[in-house]
């Protein structure tokens, strides 16, 4: 068990961990458990962080989704996968993804990304199209969107 073993010590460690970037509740829980804190201390620290509004999964997920969609140009499938890995529930993810892609839809974002990554490339060349498809899939765009953009039939998502 960690030094003071108290919820105060767990809280201090959580503050340091959250000082680098925002995190989900599950990420903080796992980190404190790895550091050897008791379940009781972890629960108390997490509750205190929620009361202080320092730990809020909805705000975290919204920020992550918007940053990933706009900054990294990720599609909804990739963002959903990342949020699930961070312990965010599906019921919370769905409305946040709708919000993240509301202004500029998935198809428009995928089109812009395709234009950036494959500018000047011959999209009638099968090899280039194959690379474009793979790239858009890695970025998390749905096969239906990719098929529409590239005019290539793809299996459903």
Image (cartoon, helix red, strand yellow):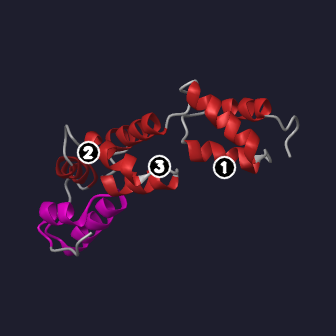
Mark 2 or mark 3, which is nearer the start of the sequence? 3
Residue 88, numbered label: 3
In the rendered image, residue 13 lying in the magenta stretch gets the answer: no
Which residue corresponds to mark 1?
30
Which quadrant: the C terminus? bottom left
Percent position of residue 26, x then y: 58, 47
Give me the C-alpha separation between circle 1 and circle 2.
28 Å
Q: Which residue is nearer to you in this view: 100 or 121?
A: 100
Circles 3 and 1: CB distance less than 8 Å? Answer: no
Percent position of residue 1, x then y: 86, 46
Give me the C-alpha separation between circle 3 and circle 2.
15 Å
Magenta-colored segment: predominant secondary structure: helix
Circles 3 and 2: CB distance less than 8 Å? Answer: no
In the rendered image, residue 138 lying in the magenta stretch gets the answer: yes
User: Is 11 on the left or on the right of 156, as rendered?
Assistant: right
Local crowd at mark 1 within 10 Å, few (<14), some, or many (≥20)?
A: few
**Residue ID at (56%, 34%):** 21
Count of numbered tags: 3
Could you tell me which secondary element the residue under label 1 belongs to? helix
Circles 1 and 2: CB distance less than 8 Å? Answer: no
Percent position of residue 78, x then y: 38, 56
Which residue corresponds to mark 2?
98
Tell me if I can see residue 19 in this picture.
no
Tell me if I can see residue 61 in this picture.
yes
Percent position of residue 101, x then y: 24, 43
Which quadrant of the structure image shows residue 140? bottom left
Could you tell me which secondary element the residue under label 2 belongs to? helix
Kindly give the residue lying farthest to the right in the view shown: 3
Residue 64, numbered label: none
Which quadrant of the structure image shows residue 13? top right
Q: The magenta stretch spans which residues? A: 123-152
Local crowd at mark 3 within 10 Å, few (<14), some, or many (≥20)?
A: many
């Amino acid at each position: 068990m960690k030094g003071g073993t108290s919820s105060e010590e767990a809280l201090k460690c959580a503050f340091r961990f959250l000082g680098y970037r925002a995190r989900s509740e599950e990420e903080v829980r796992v980190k404190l458990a790895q550091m050897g804190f008791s379940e009781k201390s972890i629960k108390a620290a997490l509750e205190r962080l929620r009361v202080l509004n320092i730990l809020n999964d909805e705000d975290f997920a919204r920020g992550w989704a918007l940053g990933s969609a706009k900054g990294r140009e990720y599609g909804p499938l990739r963002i959903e996968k990342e949020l699930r890995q961070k312990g965010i529930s599906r019921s919370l993810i769905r409305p946040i993804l709708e919000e993240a892609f509301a202004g500029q839809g998935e198809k428009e974002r995928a089109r812009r990304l395709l234009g950036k990554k494959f500018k000047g490339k011959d999209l009638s060349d099968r090899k280039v199209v194959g690379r474009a498809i793979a790239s858009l899939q890695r970025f998390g765009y749905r096969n239906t969107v990719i098929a529409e953009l590239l005019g290539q039939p793809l299996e459903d998502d």
